[in-house]
Amino acid sequence: QKEVEQNSGPLSVPEGAIASLNCTYSDRGSQSFFWYRQYSGKSPELIMFIYSNGDKEDGRFTAQLNKASQYVSLLIRDSQPSDSATYLCAVNPPSDKLIFGTGTRLQVFP
Amino acid sequence: GAVVSQHPSWVICKSGTSVKIECRSLDFQATTMFWYRQFPKQSLMLMATSNEGSKATYEQGVEKDKFLINHASLTLSTLTVTSAHPEDSSFYICSAWLRLNTEAFFGQGTRLTVV
């Protein structure tokens, strides 16, 4: 079992819709969870991080964490074509490193 | 966010030569830096964790004699790809923790092409 799993997609949503990206992780002791966005040929940029169970909102983005289910998600409201990118879920297990999922490619069409 | 600068952004080298990539934290001290490699359409694969003043911790399957990592100061880590081969061609990215176990910031990445 991979440490961090994501559906590779592509996930296609129309402009203005809500995009829902999901991620599961294997190490129950993981403490911190991050969502990064990566455009083709560029390095990842941090969107959000979440440490506690529940929801965390930042503008159009909402991160959701459920440690019991070992599940973290990212919702993007009012999706825009500029949101089209690969979204990487990253998890900090209790070993002082950051492990990435394979990423989900999001396509927002006009 | 915090700034991590990586240099060079791209490099082409001949097979058998060595290439050094630098990663600097510009406005903070990074006790821990990470080096990742990313092949086209794949995710970031952690190569090693670099701690200031100590030996790097390599992930399983990564040759430590081939990928030399030095973290000589709190703001600089270097990755040297020794005796590069075409299969080493990839996108190499460094990142640094702003604080332990918190969000990591990434350098711009280095696209290495070995011919």
Image (cartoon, coloured by chain):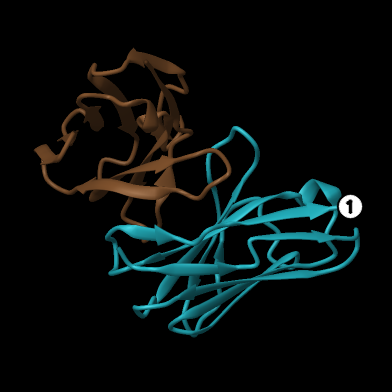
Q: Residue at x 44, y 68 (%)?
A: B4
Q: Residue at x 85, y 54 (%)?
A: B85
Front-most of A63 and B27? B27
Which quadrant holds the N terminus of chain A?
A: top left
Q: Which residue is mark 1?
A: B115
Q: Quadrant of residue A76?
A: top left
Q: Chain of mark 1?
A: B
Is residue B3 in view from this perspective?
yes
Q: Residue at x 17, y 49 (%)?
A: A51
Task: Name the spot of residue A99 as percent of width and height, x first.
Answer: 42, 47
The chain drawn cyan is chain what? B
Chain A shade in the render: brown
Which quadrant holds the C terminus of chain A?
A: top left
Query: What amino acid type should be assigned to the residue bearing mark 1?
Result: Val
Element under disc 1: loop
Q: Quadrant of residue A96?
A: bottom left
Front-most of A12 and B23? A12
